[in-house]
Each structure stands twice: as structure tokens, then as C-alpha cells.
Image (cartoon, grey):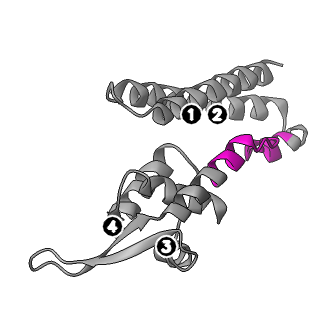
């Protein structure tokens, strides 16, 4: 829940937003930059509203249905800074879903193992190309965070490609 709070409060740092805007931004960020899954945006917003981290105002434009606009409070800004620093200073051993398969590699024939690893390399190289394209498509005035995330992912991917290449050959 704390990562979700960090995400919501971070998005509201850029100014008030209504639920649909938040949902759209979260989908874009989750698809591109994080693995955070958010089934509902309104449950976390209600909790943050109750905790005094955000405010909610009703707004209506013309004949459109009424919507709620959320804004971060001073308490929310303080909580955001606290959550951001806690997240930045949290260093944990990374776990990758591939590790479980690596553990059991000795249970499949070497020829099949190497074929699977070569197929994985193809997927990793496609992802590498996709990240390169995404990075090149970023506007020149993109936020430092967007560029940092893409570069971080590119470096992790390069290490994964190098490791998988060595494993497929051995």
C-alpha cells in the first residue's frame, strides 16, 4: 500500500487531478516504468482522504457527469517526501521470476535448456530494442525520472542479456 501511496501522492505533486486522469497516468506509468498493480484507484484515495493526505472537491463541466478532483495536502506532501526517501534508501536483494526456472535447469536436457535460453535471448533483445525506441521517443524536456528509469532498465537488461548468453553457451 505504501508504494501505491507514493505513486498517488507523487502524481498529485503535479497538481490536482480527477479520478480518470489518475487512472490513465497510473496505467501509463505501470505499463512503462513499474510493476505496481492497482485494481481500484478509489480505495487508496478514500484512505488517503481519511488520513488527511489529499482533499476532494466536486466539479462539474457543462452537461458532463460530476467528478471529484483530488489535491495533495501539506500533510500529504510531507508523507510523500517521507515515502520517497524511504523507498530510495530501501535496498533489497532483487528477485526475478526467472530465478525459479534457473533453479530447476538441471532437470531438462541440455539441448532443450539451450534452446529455451536462446528463445529467452530473442525476447530480451526485443525488449532492449523497445526500450531504446521508447528512450529515443522521449521529449527533450522529459522528467529526469523518466530518463533515469529507462537507463536503469536498459542497464539491468544488458546484464540479463550477458548472463543469459553465458548460460546458453556453457
Element type where label 2 sits in the image: helix
Mark 1 packing: few (<14 Cα in 10 Å), some, or many (20+)?
few
**Marks 4/1: CA distance?**
33 Å
- Determine which residue is flagged by label 2: 120
- Determine which residue is flagged by label 4: 20
User: Going from the N terminus, do you reach mark 3 or mark 2 first?
Assistant: 3
Element type where label 3 sits in the image: helix
Name the residue at 56% across, 33% down.
123
- The mark closer to the camera, 3 or 2, is 3
Q: Is residue 95 magenta?
A: yes
Image position of 23 with respect to 130: above or below: below
Element type where label 4 sits in the image: helix
Q: Main secondary structure of the magenta part?
A: helix
Q: Position of residue 99 (x, y in %)?
A: 80, 42
Labelled pair 1, 2 in contact (Cβ < 8 Å)? yes
Element type where label 1 sits in the image: helix
Image position of 49 with respect to 108: above or below: below
**Marks 1/2: CA distance?**
5 Å
**Marks 3/4: CA distance?**
12 Å
Quarter that holds the N terminus: bottom right
Q: In which quarter of the image is residue 165?
A: top right
Q: What stretch is highlighted in magenta?
A: 83-102
**Marks 3/2: CA distance?**
39 Å
User: Going from the N terminus, do you reach mark 1 or mark 3 first?
Assistant: 3
- Determine which residue is flagged by label 1: 123
Residue 45 marker:
3
Q: Position of residue 121 (x, y in %)?
A: 63, 28
Q: Does the magenta stretch include residue 150?
A: no
Image position of 117 with respect to 33: above or below: above
Amino acid at each position: 500500500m505504501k508504494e501505491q501511496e507514493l505513486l498517488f501522492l507523487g502524481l498529485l505533486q503535479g497538481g490536482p487531478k480527477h479520478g480518470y486522469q489518475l487512472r490513465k497516468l497510473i496505467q501509463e506509468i505501470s505499463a512503462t516504468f513499474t510493476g505496481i498493480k492497482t485494481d481500484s484507484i478509489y480505495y487508496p484515495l478514500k484512505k488517503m482522504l481519511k488520513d488527511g493526505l489529499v482533499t476532494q472537491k466536486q466539479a462539474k463541466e457543462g452537461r458532463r457527469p460530476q467528478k471529484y478532483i483530488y489535491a495533495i495536502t501539506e500533510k500529504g506532501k510531507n508523507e510523500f517526501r517521507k515515502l520517497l526517501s524511504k523507498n530510495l534508501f530501501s535496498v533489497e536483494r532483487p528477485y526475478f521470476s526467472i530465478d525459479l526456472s534457473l533453479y530447476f535447469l538441471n532437470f531438462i536436457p541440455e539441448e532443450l535448456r539451450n534452446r529455451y535460453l536462446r528463445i529467452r535471448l530473442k525476447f530480451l533483445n526485443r525488449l532492449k530494442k523497445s526500450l531504446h525506441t521508447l528512450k529515443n521517443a522521449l521529449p527533450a524536456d522529459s522528467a529526469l525520472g523518466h530518463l533515469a528509469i529507462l537507463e536503469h532498465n536498459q542497464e539491468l537488461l544488458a546484464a540479463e542479456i550477458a548472463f543469459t548468453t553465458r548460460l546458453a553457451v556453457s
